[in-house]
Image (spheres, rainbow, N blue to C red):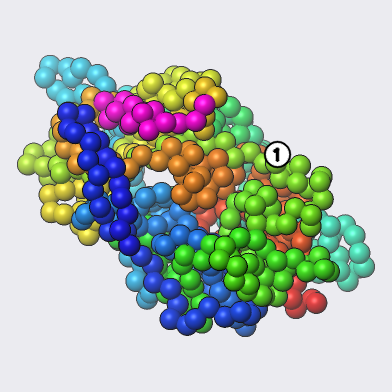
Amino acid sequence: TMAAATWTDRGRRAVTILGTVTRSTSSHSALKSQYDALVIGGGEICGAAYLQKGGLKTAVLERRHVLGGAAVSEEIFPGFHFSRCSYLLSLLRPHIYADLELKKHGLKVYMRDPHAFTPMLEEGVKGAPPRSLTLGSDLAMNLKEIGKFSQKDAKAFPDFVAHLDKLAGAIHPLLDAPPVDIPGVTAGSLRKRLAAAKTLMPIVKCGLKLGKNIPDFYEIITAPIMKILNRWFESEPLRATLATDAVIGAMTSPSNPGSGYVLLHHVMGELDKEKGAWGYVEGGMGGVSKAIASSARSYGVDIFTEKDVEQVLVGSDGAAKGVVLKDGTEIHSKVVLSNATPYVTFKKLTPQAALSPEFIKAVDQIDYTSPVTKINVAVDKLPNFLASPTPDDKPGPHHQCSIHLNCESVEVLETAYKEAMNGRPSAKPMLEMTIPSVLDPTLAPPGCHVVSLFTQFTPYHIEGREWTDQDREAFADNAFAWVEQYAPGFKKSVVGRDILTPPDLERIFGLTGGNIFHGSMSLDQLYLARPLPSLSDYRSPIKGLYLCGSGCHPGGGVMGSPGWNAALTVMADLKRH
């Protein structure tokens, strides 16, 4: 498949080039007219694998030409392979990694260490470069780095990390199981109540792990993260660097209640038994989708791309009977699982007559606000930072990090947030830069690199109107101008760019509102209330129709868990009936 990509760079004329897009291969078997289970969307194949292992003949139907939902690799410019949407791996649960034998199926992850690099925009003293803050797994190095700004903070940091680790570790039982079955526990026969009581065990385990830290846990999930950080630390660069993980992907500020949970959500990641680690997948994030798909196929799952579902079929008895594709093809099944957002599932794919007006109104009220514009950049030279220059275009340890730009102080983040809330893209946006080709040479031609800019804050509409191409280019130009201040020569190195505003993320990847989590990770949309209190158990008002994507518990980024939990729910229902 050939895809046209338009790119511009200041000082160069606009051109259109053709780049080969990596196509995901479909199952070798033909699409059947009858399955036990159908999964809409190729972003959640884990659930399909577990359903197939459980004895259900399962098929996955992906709308796009490439498999993986937001975790895809695409060759936007010749020779440059991008993780076009999601860009880092961490929250893939260990039991899923082991169960599906993903290493055997080709998943290779490059571990990053150090993890975070925050350069300063300041004049160096006596010819020295500007300061920077680098954090990684080496505690001694961390203390030395933090000590450049505050010895007091350096002393407090180990206790802070241990504190967060304890809180994050306690959540793991909740990630690996469906939420508590409140109706089952509170109603029905004694036998049914006792059966439902098993769903209480994860929350009991969570409570036991927390112990005397339960008040601290309650505080961090409800309080503004700045309330927590101000108690621990005094230096702005450290507070701002930590605060970025409390707002990443969320239309919130470090001073807003609930931002603490977003930080905890990112801290609880794990790769290769290393807590809090994030890594680059070889070949881009499509590599993890490819490995999961390979595992699923080995169990017998049929996987198809370019199969656009028009509607879920609902029988006269009010139960899901399968789907109809845009081309009119009907495929029947016992159950249907939707990896689309709850909004798309119930407003676009489900016949509205099958849902109550009250339910539709509740779905309309789910918050999908997104602050993210993703810019994928092809460069012919490695960015060289004033704060940590490297000779001969050779990468330093800091090049493998999440590089935080415009993050010297929390005030910068607050101002950027307020501008977006007023309908304007941030004039000084928060920029999280990653350069995965530093560790993975398969992504770019020799001497060249792929750069990801995850930027905040940008609104869905600009002062009430839609984004134009001119708006996109102007925002990218401004973002590049800020990068240029930290790494002179960056703009000249750009050979192509792919700009994805919130409406673009919605249009291309089906992310309602452009929200990378399939719905805001706010307290009113977590656990028993994700995405709605009536939908927290993956079941829908339509019998046989289930949710299995990031819009349900445990939320965005926890790869595989929504599908795993949904599959458990489906199997339990089929066994019961």
The relative height of residue 164 versus residue 351 in the rendered view (above or below) is above
One can see residue 250 in this view: no
Mark 1 lies on a secondary structure that is: loop
> Where does residue 191 sit, x and y in percent of width and height?
88, 71
User: What residue appears at the point 16 percent right and 37 percent down from the top-left corner?
Assistant: 493
Give the labeled residue for mark 1.
Answer: 365
User: What residue appears at the point 45 percent right and 53 percent down from the top-left corner?
Assistant: 70
Q: Tell whether position 476 is magenta.
A: yes
Counting the numbered discs, the total is 1
> Where does residue 129 sit, x and y in percent of width and height?
17, 25
Residue 378, picture quadrant: top left
Q: Which residue in the rendered view is the most extreme toward the left? A: 392
Q: Quadrant of the N terminus?
A: bottom left
- Give the crowd class for mark 1: few <14, some 14-19, many >=20 residues within 10 Å: few
Q: Amino acid at mark 1?
A: Gln
Q: Quadrant of the C terminus?
A: bottom right
User: What residue appears at the point 75 percent right and 46 percent down from the top-left corner?
Assistant: 360
**Predominant SS along the magenta part:** helix
User: What residue appears at the point 91 percent right and 64 percent down from the top-left corner?
Assistant: 188
> Where does residue 451 sit, x and y in percent of width and height?
27, 44
Image side of residue 203 versus residue 119, left or right = right
User: In the depicted view, which residue is nearer to us: 538 or 8?
Assistant: 8
The relative height of residue 141 versus residue 290 in the rendered view (above or below) is above
Q: Tell whether position 336 is magenta.
A: no
> Where does residue 396 sit, x and y in percent of width and height?
18, 43
The stretch in magenta equals 465-481
Image side of residue 361 versus residue 499, left or right = right
